[in-house]
Amino acid sequence: MNMTSSERIVYVDGQYCPESQGKVSIFDRGYLFADAIYEVTCIIGGKLVDFDGHMVRLVRSLKELNMQMPMSTDELLAIHRKLVADNNVDEGLIYMQISRGNADRDFNFPSKETRPVVVMFTQARPVLESPLAKRGLKVISLPDIRWGRRDIKTVQLLYPSMAKNAANDAGADDAWLVQDGLVTEASSANAYIVTADDKIVTRSLSSDILHGITRAAVLRFAAEAGYVLEERSFTIAEALEAKEAFITSATSFVTSVIDIDGNVIGDGKIGPVSRRLREIYLEKAVAPASDTARIERKSRPRAATSAWFLHCPPPGPRECSQGQGRRGISTPVGPAAFQGHFSRKRWIFPDSVFGRPSVKMIERGYL
Ligand SMILES: Cc1ncc(COP(=O)(O)O)c(C=O)c1O
């Protein structure tokens, strides 16, 4: 195997190989139709942050597109771990893409027998010490012209990429996207404001936005810390009047927004709420990051409303970035649609979070 020492080991369709030898077919439907979904999991101290959350969303994205789960979540976890270890990644991210597979170009989906193609690679980079997080972001507002199923994490990222470039061309760092006068989200993050009366406001979950894994954790931690949360839409005008603005994503955690369309937000400095939420997130989700937590299949789901269980292995829920609940006590884990509770050592989420046919998914053996 020829490889230079600087090459990463990547995973392509069942094989580990040096990155220069990782190739996908020109018939890959991800390449031809953006018929593929992805997840990005943060790596801190060589550990995966909130792997379970990413797996739950992955399964949901696949279900929404009627795509097959290519292997069990345990097998996906094993590949993640191997790539992190083989590439000696201490800090950065791991990207995973699953396409519907290789087939002659046709708008109709190929037969069910078509094998999904899984690709994974790591990107080592500092995520904890980010200059932008220290300074705060400048954003511009742009119309949100993406498709209507932004809750599915597909690889069709051309518009977010164009938006980011437009922001950079305008001397800003990112774009906040606006639909019908209301902010949906940032180009690759969820968007928030802190109102004059100290409420944290972010758009509620729907097909208009990606259901951020970091969003879920941050809202839960914020509620636990006593912040008042409001899941509703807001305008750019309201954001300009806000005390603070910020974004969340897997690799930016909580990052302050200090300028929107050339207007300073608050006093133009990183505000106390976003600063505190970043600290709490790093303390509660990142510091105890454990890639040992795994999604369990429950043999007999009791009801459609409790089909998914995030299991935290011993020594207890503290180790699992999803769970801060105490044993035997049900703990609300988030407002509105993302609410679940911790019971019998498991996080239990309602169907509204991960989609109704989840029981069917379990019965089909996707987990
Ligand atoms: C459009 C969009 N919204 C929100 C997010 C944040 O999601 P997460 O917190 O799961 O990284 C992302 C992340 O890629 C995104 O692309």
Image: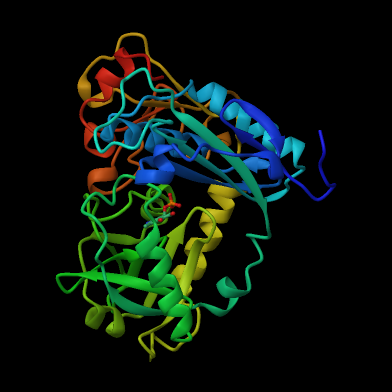
The residue shown at (43%, 45%) is: 31
Residue nearer the viewer, 74 or 303: 74
- Residue under the point 34% across and 25% down: 308
What colour-coding does the image apply?
rainbow
- Count of residue discs: 0
Q: Is residue 320 above or below residue 169?
A: above
Vertically, is 309 above or below 46? above
* Quadrant hosting ligand 1: bottom left
Q: For residue 248, what is the image quadrant?
A: bottom left
Residue farthest to the left, as pictured: 180
- Considering only vertical position in the picture, is 262 above or below 296? below
x 36%, y 9%: residue: 299
Residue 96 placed where, x, y %? 52, 40
Identify the residue at image location x=25%, y=18%. Answer: 360
Horizontally, residue 182 falls left or right of residue 292, namely left
Q: Position of residue 142 (x, y in %)?
A: 30, 76
> Which image quarter holds the N terminus?
top right
Q: Give the side of residue 22 with respect to residue 178, left or right.
A: right
Quarter residue 320 falls in: top right
In the rendered image of this protein, does residue 73 appear above or below residue 208? above
Q: Is residue 273 left or right of residue 330?
A: right
Q: Is residue 261 left or right of residue 51?
A: left
Residue toward you, 7 or 254: 7
Is residue 288 visible to the viewer in this orientation of the structure?
A: no
The foreground one among 103 and 112 is 103
Residue 314: give x, y in percent of width and height. Answer: 59, 23
